[in-house]
Amino acid sequence: MSLGLHEIVENTRGKNLFFSTDIDQNIQDADVIFISVNTPTKDYGSGAGQAADLRFVESCARRIAEAGGGDKVVVEKSTVPVRTAQMVNEVLKGANNGFNYQVVSNPEFLAEGTAMVDLESPDRVLIGGEKTDTGNAAVKKVASIYANWVEDDRIITTNLWSSELSKLTANAFLAQRISSINAISALCEETEADVDEVAKAIGMDTRIGPKFLKSSIGFGGSCFQKDILNLTYLCRHFGLPEVAGYWQQVISMNEYQKERFVQRMLDAMHNTISGKQIAILGFAFKKDTNDARESPAISICKRLLEEKGSLKIYDPQVSKESILSCLDISDESVLARLTFSESAEQACSSAHAIAILTEWDEFKELDYKKILDTMYRPAHIFDGRNLLVLEKLRELGYRAFGIGKA
Ligand code: UDX
């Protein structure tokens, strides 16, 4: 079992891990510098809502060039659009300070909640550099850091642009699998096929594989949507509208899935939830994190509020403040229909319906029989993560719905 971040910092701090705010001195002393800053979606000017905002990456490059101190390898760790290294290179070379800089791309593939495990035993480490002698030497230098704990055959090297593009492509492919199985979930609901059974059947084909085939209310998180938007923006920029359209569809399907879930709730509840209490179980974009960025719960809750439902939200880790900031509602009359609960049981008490929006393990263990006694009848449960066994809930007396299940 690998150590968590806290223990690792405790064990290494002051030995080979140091924190400092003396940026220039540390730039001067370093041989290798990792740029690991945020690259959010641009929310202003040209490319707003799609392109990556590279101003933090650029200001790092400027600071490195200004601080000087010797030849350096500059590693792009942040997720960036393909060809960003060109910009970083221009900034570094533009300083004309007599030092030689080599830009290397080394994208990060770790996922939230499993970051330390992913770092310790990655599927692969990708390092891209210029195909010149100095470029190759820089790639080798970065590879030698990882070689301390990663087997050689898992460290792959490519040219700069392949490495930059692989990160966006990996996330686009992962998201595409989710949208693909979610598209099939809609068909399952019409045909009495069961999406979990279909996923299992296709996933056993080793060419397809079983991972990222869990049908859901849609993907969320700070990466998938951002990276696909960025990818489609790049495709348009390079005059490839058909390619952009293909990837755009992955996002459209994700939006459709969230709306479909809301529509299913409305249909089941006589097309109105006005005046009804709905318990929202889970707000995080996935379990084991307190992160709600781009969580599918955001648009689902907003839509339910639009339909004049009253929501009681419970999430084991996401704070009330964070939920409110994600929902970004200023209308007092809408806010009055929003409350927060300390437990799942409390959220469900006096509710007309339960919506499970995050697959937290604790939701599997709840006493749904006891909960039913505290709810209005008919009691509805909408399992947006296919966490529970619908037949059992129906035996208890719920009107139970899953994703991709009749
Ligand atoms: C992702 C990538 O997995 C990681 O490699 C990259 O570095 C960053 O982006 P992360 O955003 O932490 O990581 O979450 P991930 O586990 O990939 O899940 C993303 C979303 O997809 C979640 O909302 C999750 O619930 C959803 N999901 C995932 C599904 O709906 N079904 C699945 O089968 C898998």
Image (cartoon, rainbow, N blue to C red):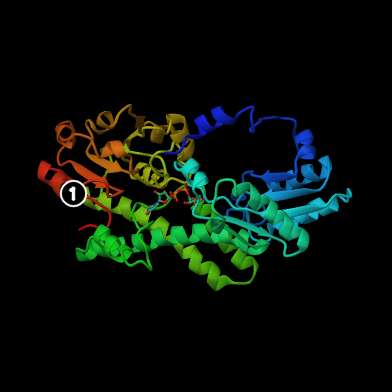
Towards the viewer: 264 or 195: 195
Q: Where is residue 56 in the image (x, y as percent from the top left)?
A: 69, 44
Q: From the image, tell me which residue sits under label 1.
A: 390
- Taking the image as shown, residue 305 lies to the left or right of residue 68, namely left
Type of amino acid under label 1: Leu
Towards the viewer: 75 or 8: 8
Q: What element carries label 1?
A: helix
Q: Residue at x 27, y 60 (%)?
A: 195
Q: Does the residue labelled 1 lie within 8 Å of ligand 1?
A: no
Q: Residue at x 34, y 34 (%)?
A: 313
Q: Residue at x 20, y 44 (%)?
A: 380
- Taking the image as shown, residue 199 lies to the left or right of residue 229, namely left
Q: Quadrant of residue 159?
A: bottom right
Q: Quadrant of residue 286?
A: top left
Q: Residue at x 66, y 30 (%)?
A: 19
- Taking the image as shown, residue 134 lies to the left or right of residue 257, namely right
Residue 134 seen in render: yes
- Taking the image as shown, residue 344 lies to the left or right of residue 47, namely left
